[in-house]
Amino acid sequence: MKIAYLCDISPEHTQPYSGGNARIYRALKDHVGEVDILPQSWGAAEPVRRAIYALPEGVNLRLRWRLHLLLSQIISRSVTQALAAKKYDVVFGAYSFQSMARLKTPYPMLKAFTADASFTVYKQSEIGARFGSSWLSRRLLDPLTFRAERAIYQNLDLALWPSDWLKREADPLYDLSESQSVVVPWSANIDTPKAEATPLALSKDAQVNLLVVGRDWFAKGGPVAFETMNILREAGVDARLTVIGTQPPDVHINPYVKVHRALNKAVPRERALFEAAFRNAHFLVQPSFESWGFAFCEAAAYSLPSLCLSVGGVPVQDGITGHDLPQGSSAIEFSEIIQGYLKNPESYAALRLSSRAEFEASLNWDAWGRRVHDLFEERLASGKLSYMPSRTCSVSSAADHNP
């Protein structure tokens, strides 16, 4: 099976999209077929793209995908030409829905796409509401974006959503059929670690380690995790908090907080610190607002139960990989969950085992790749593939390159 990979950023770069783009690309190569990365060039509009990338990051992010949509008539021609240069079975898009805009395939092929959220679903959800938007965006730009999204998603053969939440929201919004819209869970931005030999013990007479992971202390719910630690300490529990990826403000720092502002897992020493933090933690306490959350999959990989909010597509199953608490839950509710397990350490040991078991069953990239392979094979065998002939590239031009 030959796959053309389409994204606005090359998956060979491991940092963008929290590493998910690179992980998806690797899983396709490992389990699905031969994968070529399509050029990120905007064709005749390439000078515009280069000018955008020269801007500060915040401006770049806001402009890049909107201008990509605006110029999609031009940009899509270069994508179609790249597809025509070789015979592919699948054109696969990740994250950047705008890269699929006005895409006309030069011959019949499967069109598939994956992302942890769509723009409109995100904006209309409690997650997007946390960040707000301008009047111009809400009244003018958002409706235009929605129309573009609807056309793009309806033109897909397969929309591969990582969460039930996203499928539940996207299907009626974009009028997607059951055959188009499928849930295939994503995984973590780590290689699979070895399973722990025995469950890490939890005891009210020993240190209890909490963990927060992410780049934004407030967005990840850091203040609630800090207050949870303090409540436990006031109750006589020797609770400690480790923070990875961000620097809490001084008001959320005390002698019981350890901070690793940034850990590069490609550096052996820093990777060892990362792994030690996960293996020695008793709970990932992360009441964040996000559409997926790689850290929750990473926690499950290390048998670490997660405590989060029931929001978006966060991959935490209540009583299996941790607990998702109702929105609005405070540090008191989080501390009560932990205190309950302190009174019943056997239940905690079982929770660690089920966390890892769920990771091995469905929250790993091998499982994602195998499921996607089967879906692609099934759909290709049916012969029902999308085909929107391009005026600039024909089937014969593709055949000329593939005798």
Image (tube, rainbow, N blue to C red):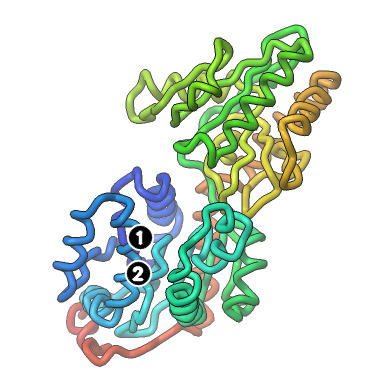
Left or right placement of residue 134 versus residue 374 in this view? left
Mark 2, residue position: 66
Seen from this angle, which residue lies furthest front? 135
Name the residue located 80 percent from the left edge and 19 percent from the top edge: 342
Front one among 195 and 388: 388
> Where's residue 355, x and y in %?
68, 36
**Marks 2,1: beta carbons within 8 A:** yes
Name the residue located 18 percent from the left edge and 78 percent from the top edge: 401
Image quarter where the N terminus lies is bottom left
| Residue 108 higher or lower than 82, as above or below | below
Secondary structure under tag 2 reads helix
Mark 1, residue position: 62
Front one among 262 and 230: 230
Q: Which numbered disc covers residue 394?
A: none
| Residue 239 higher or lower than 373, as above or below | above
> Where's residue 103, x and y in %?
34, 80
Q: How many C-alpha atoms fall within 10 Å of the one at disc 2: few (<14), some, or many (≥20)?
A: some
> How many numbered marks appear?
2
Q: Mark 2 belongs to which amino acid?
A: Arg
Task: Say whether residue 240 is visible.
Answer: yes
Name the residue located 49 percent from the left edge and 21 percent from the top edge: 250
Q: Mark 1 belongs to which amino acid?
A: Arg
